[in-house]
Image (cartoon, rainbow, N blue to C red):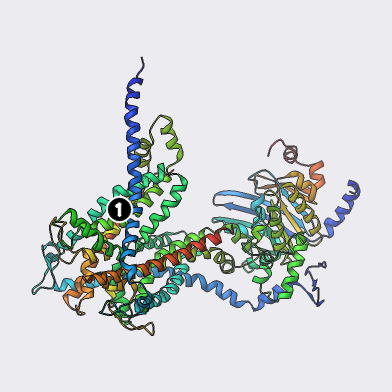
Amino acid sequence: MKLVDHTKVLQQMKSRIITNSILKILFFCATMFGLVVLGILFYRVLNQGIGYLDLQFLQSLPSRKPEQAGVYTALIGTVWLMAVVAPVSLLIGVGTAVYLEEYAPKNKFTNFIQINISNLAGVPSIVFGLLGLTLFVRALTLGTSVLAAGLTMSLLVLPVIIVASQEAVRSVPNELREASLGMGATKWQTIVRVVMPASIPGILTGGILALSRAIGETAPLVVLGLPLFLAFLPRTVFDMFTVLPMQIYNWTGRPQEEFQGLAAAGIIVLLLLLIVMNSIAVLIRNKFQKRY
Amino acid sequence: MWIKGDLKMSVHESTHQSYSVQKMIEDKKQKASATQLLEKIMPKVLLVTAILSILTTIGILLTLIVETFTFFEHVSIIEYLTAKKWYPFSDPGSFGILPLIAGTIKVTLIAGIVAVPIGLSSAIYLSEYASDAARRIIKPILEVLAGIPTIVYGFFALTFVTPLLREIIPSLEMFNALSPGIVIGIMITPMIASLSEDAMSSVPRSMREGALALGSTKLEVSLKVVLPAAVSGIVSSIVLALSRAIGETMIVAVAGGSTPNLNLNVTESIQTMTAYIVQVSQGDAGYGTTIYYSIYAVGFTLFLFTLLMNLLAQFISRKFREEY
Amino acid sequence: MQKPEAKNAEVEKEMQIKQSVYETKQLNLWYGENHALKNINLDIKENEVTSIIGPSGCGKSTYIKTLNRMIELVPGVRTSGEINYRGRNIFDKDYGVEELRTKVGMVFQKPNPFPKSIFENVVYGPKIHGIRDKKILMDIAEKSLRGAAIWDEVKDRLHQNAFGLSGGQQQRLCIARCLAIEPDVILMDEPTSALDPISTLKVEELVHELKENFSIIIVTHNMQQAARISDKTAFFLNGEVVEYDQTDKIFSNPKDQRTEDYITGRFG
């Protein structure tokens, strides 16, 4: 006696197949939803902001009068911030990655460091602002300066660099290390002359990713006390400054339509900056991919 | 060429000086104490950089805990945990954290309602249905969504989403929980989509083939075979995304308002824990005032929320991970 | 080829006069609990090609990596006994491992050039040991590349990336890299197993030339190769040296039954 009724199976088959087709379309639409939103966002920003985007905009200081306002101080401030974050976070991050991959013994302490880094990656950025406020602004009396902000943001993006650098170092094949050691090179010589050159593309990509993140962050900088409105440029790392996202935040909060337009223009500048940086990262990755 | 002997000697082509590589190495070794020094110091230097990451965590904990303690010298912890109103600027002020938590939870839940179905659907589409070419184009675009600065999303929420929603829901206030909630949901969708897709991709093809060979539709394979097999990765990705939503600041600061409310209403102005910290930081709260310390107490509460969520995500990922 | 009998008399004389390059005495090695090398006693002479043969897992790779202490890269390795390189025990606390590896070079099974130019690959060794004079480095590079029979193929592209070379060329580049520091001994761990037959032949010819000036110890799983290129052969089985003698004796008239079984293909 047959246990499976094939006529019934065939009857149900049709509805199962239809359900499959319907849901396939739904899943596709869901995937497209994100792309559509992205498109709308870009369109809106471009629409609102392109009118305000001109050379004068890039070169002017912010002002209470919308016609005269510009992002000059904010742009320069962003560059200053990058100038601090890049070396600090790279030095500490790459150093940590090299230690973890080349020297660290496989014990609980090393494990603890790794877990700690993963947890740091999940801490809200505003909490880093609180840390920076207490430690850099007050305790080290750096005040609301480029240096205090730079150090705070370096800590924020540290996990990104560490993870990317670890990946890069790990992917250097062991045979290269063996070849170097086999010739009588010391461990440090091997790291400097073989491992590091081979892992630079990965490290650079990670660094650019981290910088992109640092440029777009606003919350920790607000906590540090960065002014929303600043009409002069920093001259040293101890000076006050403002950055692009802060300027955008300032303009967004104003009800007048002109300021909304200015905010949109500022956003265009910020997004362009990010596109350029990420394109460089992709270029680097592709150029060095061919080596192997 | 070489000349026989223990130390091989060579003759330089043009100068006809004889030299021995091994002898040169010997000589250099006498003077190479600097290399030896580097060899010993560098591991220690690198260890110091590695410890800096631990020091950062300790720094965060210390800062939050110490300043929170100071806060609790001014405000009782009972009031903090049970009072139903957060009016820090009034005289006398009321410092009940619940309204801020309510604001955070409202926004996070809305974000979750948006992000989970869309994120999972995208993950299923990318992992089970999409062609390689489609995946290669779509995935990077989703990454872009994840990389947009949050202030841009905040602007988008305020100037596009809120007006749009007000056409559908006329009673919606200018500042509310719905608009930032939806936008945060859009922001965290790539996280769920990407991590879930990774989890689903690591389910071996042989499992899918087994189900297909039995006459399953692709839908059934996805929902009944792949999803259950990747569930720990998927759940952990959702928890991580929600944790990110909890910690999100600029979108709610711009579009959510600054009115802490302890209720279930999502159409009126709210304030989240993060937005409060921003509000105070922008203001003139002097160092040493109760309001100054309150941002640390709120920050500590926020930190605990996200820490718990992150630990939960790691726990789920590890405990229920299926090894393939 | 000389007649076997005449060769034997010569060889007997040589065995007495020739210097030992590696004297292994009662060497034992453990990977954790696994006793991988058992009481190895082996006397390897200079300016010869000594091959080490045996089935998979017999310890031949382990042994050759012990000779330049590369085996210490594996965690959990323990040794007892001595290995005297030209009279000095390599396990001595004050015998620096870098110093040993400057005198004993190694060529690996899979070619492993650095992702640098051909020139940079060859002069890597001299550079790390402090030799900076550009003229001398160029000279060393040419000499080593000639010595590895690859100079003509690369002389016009010294500054191109080494990854552009074929597998066989890469392996000869690795040999050149090894020659550049002018070591005393060259260890080769199955150097041709990843190469095509033509490249294999080229490397074998190279080995034959190099033995004039170097002592070569080569691990191979290819018995015909051992018979072709080596003067002496050691047969390893289960971590022990079963037999060690002139290559033609091993292959024509082995003393141990196990050697004969392996050579005739009854196992392995």
Q: Amino acid at mark 1?
A: Val
Image position, residue C130 (x, y; %) = 66, 74
Residue A263 is left or right of residue B44, and the answer is left
Image position, residue C170 (x, y; %) = 68, 57
Who's the residue at 48% across and 73% down the image? B45
Who's the residue at 40% across and 67% down the image? A272
Residue situated in front as seen by the camera: B250 or B162: B162
* Tally of numbered tags: 1
Q: State whether residue A60 is above or below residue C109.
A: below
Residue A290 visible in the current orientation = yes
Quadrant of the drawing holding the N terminus of chain B: bottom right
Q: Secondary structure at mark 1?
A: helix
- Chain under label 1? B
Residue situated in front as seen by the camera: B71 or B91: B91
Image position, residue A60 (x, y; %) = 34, 80
In the image, farthest residue toward the top? A1
Who's the residue at 76% across and 62% down the image? C151
Q: State whether residue C243 is above or below residue B221.
A: below
Q: Which quadrant would residue C255 be assigned to in this image?
A: top right
Residue situated in front as seen by the camera: A162 or C221: A162
Q: Determine crowd level at label 1: few under 14, some 14-19, many 20+ residues with C-alpha closer than 10 A.
A: many
Image position, residue C214 (x, y; %) = 77, 61
Quadrant of the drawing holding the C terminus of chain B: top left
List the residue tagged with mark 1. Answer: B239
Residue C246 visible in the current orientation = no
Q: Which quadrant would residue C69 be assigned to in this image?
A: bottom right
Residue C13 is left or right of residue B49, and the answer is right
Residue A118 is left or right of residue B91, and the answer is right
Q: Which quadrant would residue A181 be assigned to in this image?
A: bottom right
